Amino acid sequence: MKRRQPVAITGAGCLCAAGPDLAACMEALFRGQRKPAPPELFSAGHAVKYPVFEVPESFFPASMPADPDMLRTARLARAASAEALADAGWEAADLERLKVGVIVGTTVGSAMNNEAFYREYRDGGSPGMEPIGRFLAANPAAAVADYFGFRGPVQTIVNACSSGTDAVGIAAQWIRAGLCDLVLAGGADELCRTTYNGFISLMITDSEPVRPFDLKRKGLNLGEGAGMLVLESDALIQRRPDRVRAWLAGYGGACDAYHLTAPHPEGSGLKHALSEALDAAGCQPEDIAFINAHGTGTPDNDRVESRTLADVFPGIPFLSTKGFTGHTLGAAGGVEAALTLVCLEQERIPANIGFSEPDPDLPACPVAVETIVAGRFALSQSLAFGGNNAVIVMAKGERR
């Protein structure tokens, strides 16, 4: 693949268990603070209270109160989008005459939250259609576009845990193709009893706070949240050159279809996605300052990622931020893109919380302490069920 034209990123927003906005999240990361706890949004009846990273109600903006007709995934996406737009210096009214697109990654989002409806229907009843109406109205990308009055392309990406990263990469393609002047892109996902039980049944959930890449890791902790970016065309940036926080320099995606839930043992699809993203960015592995790894804390994921990073990026520092946020599934790519952007700006990365004891089976280990990083590029990668892999490369912007 030939080098692609970088696309400007002018704003970022994030709402997750680490904090109500991106600045608060970063403070929590560099303080080494996290608060996993048993879920309060639902009960599951397990003898073991597997911890999750739940977003407290107090984290939502006062301007976006809970709405019985709006499901949580869409509300998370709206909140992070509002922060990203404000960070970019835009009011929604300023964008009325522009082609503004919205693309949001998610997984099951709210699709599994209507158990009572499904149960009654399965038992031969005639449940009211309110849950289905609410579900149809809560498509996260459509909900964001409707809230701000945007009339450009709208797409929700459902590509398992690479959804948010794919959304950011596709948004850049919309800009380059001239489909949009500006795109809101990222990921949003809410905690759900069905996914909570599902990961427990797969035996890849840790009963203790998640320990990415650590010898004693037992699996992930689920989380929820949203991370959104504002991407802009060259024509807009020429009017506001000082707004660029970073550049989306490269994106790669590949599916090796190795297994329904397990990554390819040699990282086949991940290596392909990495190569594609680096080529698009026009850079070499040694140009990367640091990597925000997928780092779920599952034995298989972390083994494959460690081996791939040791092979492709020897000596390049890396970490997983999921120790602070939990695995936010379809939101992960958006959340981690926002966190990566700030780390690139600040030229430092936090410690990989939860990692204390190296696994001799892993050839590369994450940073155990806050680390200064140098370089123009950073990389964020997502691995997903079905063998999906997505990678973005960011370059430093001009805003200070």
Image: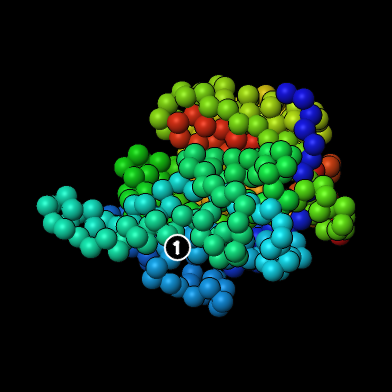
Q: Position of residue 186 (x, y in %)?
A: 60, 50
Task: Give residue 274's quadrant in the image.
Answer: top right
Q: Amino acid at mark 1?
A: Arg
The residue positioned 77% from the left and 25% from the top of the image is 2
Q: For this view, does 325 lie left or right of residue 222?
A: right
The quarter in which the C terminus is drawn is bottom right
Q: For this view, does 228 lie left or right of residue 58?
A: right
Q: Position of residue 338 (x, y in %)?
A: 67, 53
Q: Looking at this rendering, what residue extends furthest in the front direction?
A: 97
The residue positioned 87% from the left and 52% from the top of the image is 238
The quarter in which the N terminus is drawn is top right
**Of the pair 292 and 168, the residue shown nearer to us:** 168
Q: Position of residue 301 (x, y in %)?
A: 51, 34
Question: Element at badge 1?
Answer: helix
Q: For this view, does 205 lie left or right of residue 343?
A: left
The residue positioned 37% from the left and 49% from the top of the image is 195
In the rendered image, the vertical position of residue 160 relative to residue 34, given as above or below: above
The residue positioned 83% from the left and 58% from the top of the image is 243
Task: Give residue 175's quadrant in the image.
Answer: top right
